[in-house]
Image (cartoon, grey):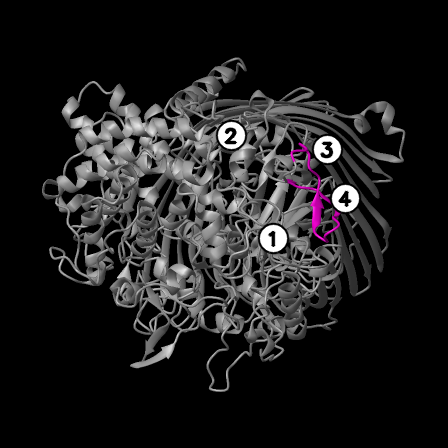
Amino acid sequence: MPGVTIAKKGTSSGANSDVNGKYSIDVNPGDVLVFSFVGYKYQEVKIANQSVLNIQLAVDAKSLEEIVVTGYGNQKKKDFLGSSSSIKSATIQEMPVVSVESAMQGRMTGVQVQQSSGQPGAGISIRVRGVTSIAGGNEPLFVIDGVPQYNNDNRAMNGMSSFNASDIESIEVLKDASATAIYGSRGANGVVQITTKSGKAGVSRVTYESTYTNQIIQRKLNLMNGVQMLDFIKQYYSNSNLVLPAEVTNAKNSETDWQDQVLRAALQQNHTLSFSGGNDKTQYYVSGNYLDQPGIIKGSDFNRGSMRFNLTSQLNSRISLRTYMTVSRTVANGFSATDNSPTRHQGKNGVGAMVLASPTVPVYNPDGTYGNPRPFSFSGIDVENPLAFTKESLDRNTVVRFQGGMDFNIKLAEGLVNTTRLGGDYFSARADLYWPIVLAQLSSGVGIGQLTTTSSLNVVAEDYLEYKKKFGDLEFEGIVGGSIQSAQQDIINLLGSKYISDDLRNYSFAAAGSVSKPVTDIITNRLVSGFSRVRLNFKDRYLFTASIRRDGASVFSKNKKYGIFPSLGLAWKASEEPFMKNVTAISNLKVRATWGQSGNPAIQPYQSLLIGNVINTAQGAGSGLAVGLSPTLPNDNLTWETTTQTNAGLDFGFLNDKYRVTLDYYVKNTTSLLATVQLPPSSGYNTIIDNVGEVENKGFELEIGTDLIATKDLRWSIDANLSINKNKVVATKNNLPFSSGNSRITPGDPLSSFYGPKFNGYAADGEMAFMDVNADGIIDGRDNQYIGNPYPSTIIGLNTSLKYKRFNFMMTWSSVQGNSIDNQMLFTAAAPSPIYNRSAEIYTYYPKPKASSIHRRSDLFIEDGSYIRLRNIRIDYSLPLGDTKFIKSANIYLSGNNIITITNYKGYDPEVNVFSGNSLQQGVDSGAYPGSKTVTLGLTVNF
Amino acid sequence: MIQVMKKIKNIQLIPILMILMMGSLTSCEKFLEEIPPARYQISTLSKPLLDAFVIGAYEPLSRSRGRLWESTLTRDIEGLAEYCQLPAGGGTNYMNYNFEPQRNDNAARWTTFYEAIGKSNLIIKAIDDDKSLAENIKAPYKAEAYFVRALCYWWLTRMHGDVPLRLSPIENSDGTALPLTSSKTVIDQITKDLAFCEANLPNKVPEANTGRATKGSAKMMLADIYLWNKDYTNARLKAKEVIDNKATYGYDLVKSLETLYSPSTPTNSEEIFAIKFSQQKALGSFLPTYAFEGRALDAGLAARGISALMCRNAPLIKDWDRKDLRRNWNLIDTITLKGVKVRANLIPQASFMFGKFRDGAAPEETAAGNDYYLYRFAEAYLILAECENQLNGPTQAAYDAVNQVRRRGYGVDLAKSSTLADFPAGLSKTAFDDLIFQERGYEFIYECKRWWDMVRTGRADAVAKAAGKTPTGGSIARFTLYLPDVELVNNPSIK
């Protein structure tokens, strides 16, 4: 077996076995050699007089020595009584992921990972055991090497995309309250613990990994071509009893397929070079990564350069130090994603332009200028020539990020260790936007430039004391500690227009004829905490844990800043009982139950204060600018959302853990739900953040793993996971429903449900009819009913891995069921109006489209988003290298991602949530960048 | 420390230690206090603070994409005038006076109006609660808040009829349900509030405050309200007060149309109350962009042209005397490109573009600088003339009033009688009234007054049909727009 570590016990000298399993090491009789390899039981052998020693390592059953990365200390999986899912670096590297979270898809029960769109570097949202909040956000807390982060969704650009996935040793998602309560106020949505790689003593390694990935669009939308569009316009005018304008009769038709013009096959490459090693005292891990991902839409891409330095050092017998640091720079060129505001709605966004631009218009005019996207006088005004959009506009996000920290451990006495942790995360982001003069629809023909710079510093300081002692059959482990975290964000925004030419883009605001007043802001956010935890283990059969944390958060109102978050857990390792020892078939049987509370403070700061927002208005002579104040509506009762979670679980292992089953049942109850409540405009305000309501998530998770065959040459394992979650709003203030974002919160229905009129067949005049709930003869907002919700009820993942000699074959399937998607792109493209290109399926909605047709956002446009997808299929070959000393191992692989998708969804990709995790508008597909399917060729070499 | 630790053999001390550490770390009040570095925290009232809040109450009225007079409110209400042509699509429903399908067009403007009302209510309450400032300092600000509120309700009730009448600010999210109040009650309330405005607003405002309310603007709005209610006596009274006080208030007719509708002059003597716009991104209006066709930038008319509304050849337009300078200013069918005059591209069934608001120097489509008059001095004359005629027939006073506007329109000396410009002598009361209706149409084209004139004089249906429009159902059945879903769905008191 290659790569086995052979170390001389008690020294720093060691060796590695080569490709053929051969090794050589200098020893003296009496020395003890330790043979170790991940996944196998280590062996110690005392050397006598042999010159050749052949060792056979025994397979180590997967779960026994696994470590769970819990908060403030790790725990062996067999002693862990909470609920968590994890993946290790080997699994992370199976997929050619650009961003860390993608590696988690389909692999963990209770964890839904969803890309917001197919845009390179796009935001990814993670949901752990259903959604509990509206305004508080639903993203879990990310803890990287012990340092809690903020997940910065910068206009749906992903905060985690700065990190190189190859640097990650493991990802642990803590799901139940006994595990998350230690993170108190931020643990309600689960905790994602990321641990980066360290060097290993005595194993010096240089690794080069490289992948080339070809991406193509999954499928195109079914849009009209030129002939169909002209025909549609003619029908429209005829049905509306209007005279067909001459410009339509005489229209030229260039039959442009804008999707073909704008899309391309794109080749992504990703290279990582890493060095790791060290001796007994000091280990290091250093890596560098370069990623270049062009997008399937011309002109868009994402690239990243990053470096990592991790160092662990035992300074003396009492003190050890671990430092970790990463520096990265990412640049993403986008396609003007929409935010559904009037300035960036579906027309002024690239994908919207591609869908809505008229196919009768030529890409270029005979004189070389771009084809005019408005062929008719009644054509809509916002859609630009899509190819011109890709070539001429600038929408770039540049992020430079530094994240790092240090852990300082002092052993004060036997069993008493103090850890001091300092961590920081600094990033500087720059968003450049330029709509050039040559794109007349976007820039009014004058050129519009925008620059937003955001810099953010997040610093955390923690200290905790850990005491471990064994009192006879009772093992005691306790920690007590405190933490302070402070974050500040500085924002500057500049807006200019009327440029002389497009040459300088937006880089010089002095060149703009008109610059709006710059907007600046400084936002601060702080957290102070104290926490404590006790773990008891009696006879290795009865486990108990209790923890408590008190957090104070600056974002809440004066008298409601503090919350206390306790948890309790019990477990019984039945398989360790004497009477179970005889039942050899059962290798592991653990029953566990936990209860606990965690909080969610993720709202914008300053909501509880009476603030005057500065506004500008054009009054007065002279500069024609007056500065005024607009007061906010404060909520001086604003406080935490508290989630109480009860979890009961069962872990089974059969036949020496050849078959493993994990079952969990949970009930999560969230009270004081934070929501941005839509007020009736007559109140004078649009929205207010309030604690209003209660949500319940109940669910069931099942994880099955088997190693069906495990012989020397052939191994076959299957892992499957099933997560079922039922979400319900239990109560609201006065039990009245309210609106928030694009959804409605009604007691008895799921959170963030879609409401709208229900389609009720066609009336005699060919127009759509809708259910008139209050029977007043008019269809308006009061006839809205529940028509779907964006959260899935079931998530299934299936992974199988087949290893034969040098070949390794694996497949990951995943399926999401029960969710709906608000397909706003289709809604726009199926409107009975001649102003833009239409969906070719418009006649299924409007058999006779006419001016008086009322286009309602009904249940016809809230589509079923369920899908089954072959997420990853891969074949891997370990190269036979002969007896080279230089290369220890090498393998190449070929894989495909998202190759097969089975869905009824009509949009580009059923995996879509264009406004990212924390937005009020969930489950929306509005000009979402299309998803791609990919084929990857990869190579990994170990020196 | 380590020595002490070694001596602790008793487990009981550990919990004490835990509590101590937790306690000391969590009582950090100052650390958790929020003090936003870039925003004002409001505590006690002062004059500058009050002034800033009042400016904040005006802000929604001119807000870019607030969807009031800077963009779609003007387009939709002017679209109801008989001479207006809207492009196919949503415009067709306005052309046919079929308001229901477009109900949610009202959402943005409804919200903006009520935002201004909400801010005015906050100011009024803050002033009433305050004990520190002197009454004479507070009164003009309170009057301004009443004025902004009255303006918003005046438009809301004409557009929608019965609307929720909110007169005090909400404290929190409870109790936001509010039933509809009858239009008559709404109008009675704002009439009462405007009396306070009349008494407490200044005669003039300093240059720096151009665009804020004055006595004159309160009187004009009162005249407008009385006219709507056919209370000609009071309407005449208010209009006459404005004319009689023109020296005190600084009002006079502006001779040149180019000056009157200029995008760059900060103010002029004819302005009584206008929505102020500035040639800066997001501080201006869309109106020139709406009015002109795609080549507007090259023609020096607007930053961009999107043909959102144009003018039909209705009888009002067809019969417009070519010697009336206002006709040439307002009706454009040719544009000049590179020195060459070419025919403008008009939307189907339109004969002209609205030329009133032009801003070739606007930096972009949201930044046309032409102010939008809600009340100007010319209207005082026209109201006086109309009311005088209604009360006493076409007296000399009525003729004198309207002839001022006529003479300015024709570009002749205001002081001398003019056979060209003046109304013909010896008209009957009805004929005079018809001509006043026509005159208001000429004077206020693209200023959102035509539809209100059509409705209040009962001429809407006839005039629309005479212009070739085809109201859904044969006749205009309903003169008010519908409430948007965002209000209906979130306000359970509206049945």
Q: Tell me where residue A698 appears, x and y as whole percent.
A: 71, 30
**CA separation in Å, label 1 and label 2:** 35 Å
Label 1 marks a residue whose chain is A
Residue situated in front as seen by the camera: A5 or A235: A235
Same chain assignment for discs 3 and 4: yes
Label 4 marks a residue whose chain is A
| Vertical order, B423 against B222 (above or below) | below
In this view, the mark in front (1 or 2): 1
The type of residue carrying mark 1 is Gln
**Which residue was labeled with disc 2?**
A185
In this view, the mark in front (3 or 4): 3
User: Helix or strand or loop: what does disc 1 sit on?
Assistant: helix
**CA separation in Å, label 3 and label 1:** 30 Å
Give the quadrant of residue A573: top right
The type of residue carrying mark 2 is Ser
Q: Counting other residues with Cα less than 10 Å from the Cα at mark 4, is it few (<14), some (14-19), or many (20 or more)? A: many
Range of the magenta residues?
Answer: A755-776
Q: Counting other residues with Cα less than 10 Å from the Cα at mark 2, is it few (<14), some (14-19), or many (20 or more)? A: many
Q: Quadrant of the N terminus of chain B?
A: top left
Q: Is A913 contained in the magenta span?
A: no
Left or right of B422 on screen, residue A919: right
Q: Tell me if residue A869 can be seen.
A: yes
Give the quadrant of residue A535: top right
**Which residue was labeled with disc 4?**
A721
**Which residue was labeled with disc 1?**
A824
Q: Tell me where residue B379 appears, x and y as whole percent.
A: 25, 47
